[in-house]
Structure formats: C-alpha cells, structure tokens
Image (tube, rainbow, N blue to C red):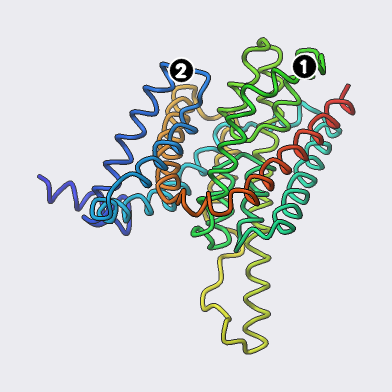
C-alpha cells in the first residue's frame, strides 16, 4: 500500500522522493494550523500566517531535524508555488478587468510600473544583495509573496526570495491596520478607499482584510483593482525571464567564465498555465463548484509554498541587514501607497 502510494506520488509529482515527505507533511501541518488561526482571527490572512509559521519553524528547530525537513520545504517553495500560481488564474475574469475601462486598466498598469521601478531603485540604492531588488519590486508592485515566488522561478533566483518574502509580508500585514487608520485623516469615500487598498496592498488576502471593514462597496472596488494588478504577473515574469536570458547570452558571447550554463525559458511554463486558466475562467465554461475547488486548491498550494519560503528565511541574516532592508521596505511601501492615492484621484 505504502509503495503503491509512493509510486502514485512519483507519477503525479515528478521529482518526489522519500526525502521530501517529512518536509511536505510538516508544511501541511503548518498550513492546517494557519487555517485554524485564520478562523480564530479572520483579520490575519491564512497565507500571511503560513509565512510566519514557516519562519518560526525554520529558525527554532535544531540542525538535525531542520536538515530532514529542508528538502521537502524547498520543493514546496518551488514546485508547489508554480502550481499555485497556475490556479491563481482562475480568480481572474477578463470581464472584471475590462469593467474598469481602458483608463482604469492603463492607470493601474502605470501604478504597477511605477511601483516596480521605484522599489527597484530604492533597493539598489540601499545595496540589497543579489536578485533581492527585483524580487522585492515584484512583491510590492504586483501581489506580494506569490509574485516574488513567480519572479524567482522565472529568473532562477529562488535563493534570494526569503528576505523579500519576509519584508513584503510584514508591510502587507501592517497595512491591514495602517490604511484604515490613515483614512480617518484622508476621508476617502468607500469606492475611493477600496481602490486605494487594491492599488497599494500586496497580497489578495491582505487586500480583503484591509478593505472589508469599510463596507461591501470598498471591498468590491479593492478586489477588482487588486486582480488587475495580479494580471500583470504574467508580463512582468516574462520580462524578468527575458532579462536573465539576455544577460546569460552576453556573458556567453564575451566568453566569461562566469557565464551560467542553463538559461531560463523565454516564457515559463507556469506563466502559460496561469494565462490559460484566466482565459478558461473568462470563457464562462467553468461551473461554480469547479471554481470553488480551484480556489481551495490554490490556497492550499500557495500555503504549502509559502511555508517552504518562510522556512528558508534566516532571521540572523534579516537582522544583520535590518536597517537597509527595513528602509527599503518602508520606502517602497510609501512609493506604492503614494501612487495608489494618485490612481484614486485620477479615477474620481
């Protein structure tokens, strides 16, 4: 029976072996705890709790058990992240996007571009290492930890993802309390506040938690704007892949010893899957029970992946760069919030 199950898993999940099971089972347990925690405190999104629980586990376990769990956690953070992003496409319908009109869609694209560029420049100026500036920009500009996972897969830089995930999760969680408080001074109406939340908060769950207290009108506006930002995940990931391919080609053409061997694909397979799911949802062929099942599957897969990414967060490394990392995150948050307010003003 056990051998049959293992053989089935090997067929369904290529690359799986027995070394992965302890980490995957532990990740599943932490996702279950995160789900229960979300039920007890609905204001905290489940995926945020997944990152936090993964980080706690990764930084409190002793060396031996951590080594046993690491292969499965790492596998979840890569393979299951791709699968979760594919299913994320079922949340998006092109009719919702076009409902904002070309002006709204164009302005949101400018907000995303400005957020990405501003965050990247801030992170570079503060000398965040490796690919962290690009990954942090993806998270703040598009959809938080999921975007960081997608970009890191597209660019082959998963090792640089944990610190940006920690920073974007922290700022997104703070936004749940800070934005409603700020609106007591800004005095935006319900649609305006919802648009601001949708344009400036990172994760979809954090958007829902931030906007829901302002009423159903605010929540509806926030979700539509947020989902338009999520649509940008596909082109941004492709551009990220293209930039790495060009760099590889330039290094290889120069005969550099640092030239890497393998280049990422021009369009990552999970991005094509994401686009296919968006088109399928937009076609109207998907029955509601199937969409609910896809949403549940997406939450579980992204939860497992974010536990894996959280497990890789090294708090000592984060604290060693706490000043620069925190400054980059807070500066980026201010840029995104400011651009979001500009979007609200132009849509009024």
Residue 128's spot in the image, x, y percent?
A: 64, 58
- Give the quadrant of residue 127: bottom right
Q: Is residue 62 above or below residue 283?
A: below
The reply, left or right, for residue 340 in relation to residue 244 is: right
Residue 168's spot in the image, x, y percent?
A: 60, 41
Residue at image position (68%, 66%) is 243
The residue beneath circle 2 is 41
Q: CA distance from mark 1 to mark 2?
A: 26 Å
Residue 60 or residue 217, whichever sits in front: 60
- Give the quadrant of residue 278: top right
| First along the sequence among labels 1 and 2 | 2
Q: Is residue 32 above or below residue 329?
A: above
What is the crowding at mark 2: few (fewer than 14 residues within 10 Å), some, or many (at least 20)?
few
Residue at image position (32%, 56%) is 71
The residue beneath circle 1 is 191
Residue 164 or residue 154, whichever sits in front: 164
Residue at image position (38%, 46%) is 59
């Amino acid at each position: 029976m056990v051998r049959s199950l293992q053989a089935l898993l090997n067929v369904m999940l290529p690359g799986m072996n027995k070394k992965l099971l302890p980490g995957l089972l532990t990740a599943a347990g932490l996702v279950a705890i995160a789900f229960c925690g979300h039920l007890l405190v609905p204001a905290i999104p489940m995926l945020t709790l997944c990152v936090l629980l993964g980080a706690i586990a990764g930084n409190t376990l002793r060396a031996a058990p951590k080594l046993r769990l690491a292969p499965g956690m790492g596998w979840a953070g890569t393979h299951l992240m791709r699968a979760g992003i594919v299913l994320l496409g079922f949340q998006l319908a092109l009719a919702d996007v076009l409902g904002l009109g070309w002006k709204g869609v164009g302005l949101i694209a400018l907000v995303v571009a400005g957020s990405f560029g501003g965050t990247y420049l801030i992170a570079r100026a503060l000398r965040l290492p490796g690919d962290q500036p690009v990954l942090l920009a993806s998270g703040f500009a598009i959809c938080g930890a999921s975007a960081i996972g997608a970009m890191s897969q597209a660019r082959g830089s998963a090792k640089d993802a944990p610190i940006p995930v920690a920073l974007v999760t922290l700022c997104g969680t703070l936004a749940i309390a800070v934005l409603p408080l700020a609106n007591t001074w800004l005095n935006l109406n319900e649609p305006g506040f919802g648009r601001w939340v949708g344009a400036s908060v990172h994760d979809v769950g954090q958007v829902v938690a931030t906007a829901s207290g302002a009423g159903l009108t605010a929540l509806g506006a926030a979700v539509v704007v947020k989902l338009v930002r999520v649509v940008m995940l596909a082109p941004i990931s492709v551009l990220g892949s293209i930039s790495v391919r060009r760099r590889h080609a330039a290094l290889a053409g120069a005969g550099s010893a640092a030239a890497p061997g393998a280049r990422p694909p021009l369009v990552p397979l999970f991005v094509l899957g994401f686009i296919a799911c968006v088109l399928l949802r937009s076609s109207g062929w998907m029955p509601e029970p199937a969409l609910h099942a896809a949403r549940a599957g997406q939450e579980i897969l992204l939860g497992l992946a974010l536990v894996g990414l959280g497990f890789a967060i090294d708090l000592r490394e984060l604290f060693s760069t706490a000043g620069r990392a925190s400054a980059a995150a807070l500066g980026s948050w201010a840029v995104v919030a400011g651009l979001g307010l500009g979007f609200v003003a132009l849509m009024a």
